[in-house]
Image (tube, rainbow, N blue to C red):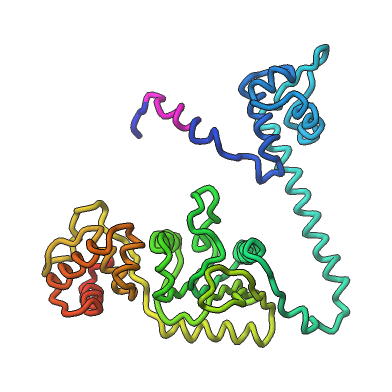
Amino acid sequence: MVDTGGKQAPRAVADIAGRRLLEGLGVTGAEEGAYRALLRHGPATLTELASEAEASVAGLRRMLPRLEDLGLVARLAGRPLRLIATPPHLAVDALAARRQEEIAHSRAASALLAAEVADRPGPQPEELVEVVIGQAAVARRYLQIERNATEEMLVLVHPPYAVDLDLGEDERPPALGSRVRTRGIYGPRAFEEPGLYEHTRRSVADGEQARVGHVPMKLAVADGRTAILPLGSEEDRAVESALVVHPSALLDALVGLFEVLWRAATPLPVGPLPPAPGEPLASLAPVAALDRFDADVLALLTAGLKDDAIARQLDISLRTVQRRVRTLCDHLGADTRFQAGLFAARQNLLDG
């Protein structure tokens, strides 16, 4: 272990300063901000706390009953009113215990609610599908289905996308591959969206199995029990409406379609790359050294992307891509772009 002399502590504090830490325990951003300000300041009047938290005294006064109910603050005896923050280990433990109790009650309630429909003959036809209207509603419904998956997600990836790929790391949903099995098939048009290649690389690193092949439509299936697919045409620039399909013959057909396409698809070459730009791959003996940039170009060529799509993914000019493709073809002894990707795959140049 390297002794840093404590120099990393201020940086660590700065890293968490802007993060929401108690959101999962039902604490709002304003409530957490007031609590953390009181922790920093120590016992304070509402006026002193308002200055520390950069909030209004009136707003803090309205918030005070809620802060007390959450167990985050307590009142000190005497006048004027002074507040003291509950020590974090006590406050967080109490909030976590309360949340666990609420979850236990909710789980018990699910059995009672299920009993109310136990005598019904089965779902009615209109309950087998639901129509979701509006971009925001579609995005929310997709994320809900994705987050509720516990076993496997099947995804046909095709633009347009319901969820913004430009979300920051803190806003982006956690990668599914880290908690459920995920299989995704990417059509060549999938990589027309800038940033999708890096997004896919992260997903594969987190455990997703990715292939490239024919993708006739957008589709996501969670645990073989719920599917979501857009209702619009392929030319639509946004997902304005979607169909959610519950267990039925239609859902069985959608899962069957995915399995047929999966067997016909080929692995997407986004595996490990050289450890640093400019450092050659050890397995590359017959041709010139292949650096990180060239490996990316070859991987995207193998995935079936055209030069302009590669330029968008790597954020470089079309002319640079065309020049590198010609150079790579010469080095690999390939007459066409397709051959270059094929030769690279045969020589295991994309496996690191």
- Return the x and y of residue 76 as percentages of the image width and height: 79, 17
Q: Quadrant of the C terminus?
A: bottom left
Q: Can residue 157 be seen from the camera position used here?
A: yes
User: Horizontally, is 16 left or right of 299 in the view?
Assistant: right
Q: In which quarter of the image is the N terminus?
A: top left
Which residue does the image show at 88% across and 79% down from the upper left? 119
Q: Can residue 205 be seen from the camera position used here?
A: no
- Return the x and y of residue 232 as percentages of the image width and height: 59, 76
Instruction: Report the span colored magenta.
Output: 5-13
- Return the x and y of residue 323 as percentages of the image width and height: 18, 65
Assess whether residue 6 is covered by the magenta stretch: yes
Which residue does the image show at 22% across and 61% down from the upper left? 320
Q: Quadrant of residue 47?
A: top right
User: Horizontally, is 148 left or right of 281 in the view?
Assistant: right
In this view, 178 is above or below 302: above
- Return the x and y of residue 340 as percentages of the image width and height: 21, 75
Viewer-proximal residue, 108 or 147? 147
In this view, 288 is above or below 219: above
In this view, 236 is above or below 180: below
In this view, 31 is above or below 80: below
Q: In which quarter of the image is residue 267?
A: bottom left
Which residue does the image show at 41% across and 25% down from the upper left? 6
Which residue does the image show at 12% across and 64% down from the upper left? 288
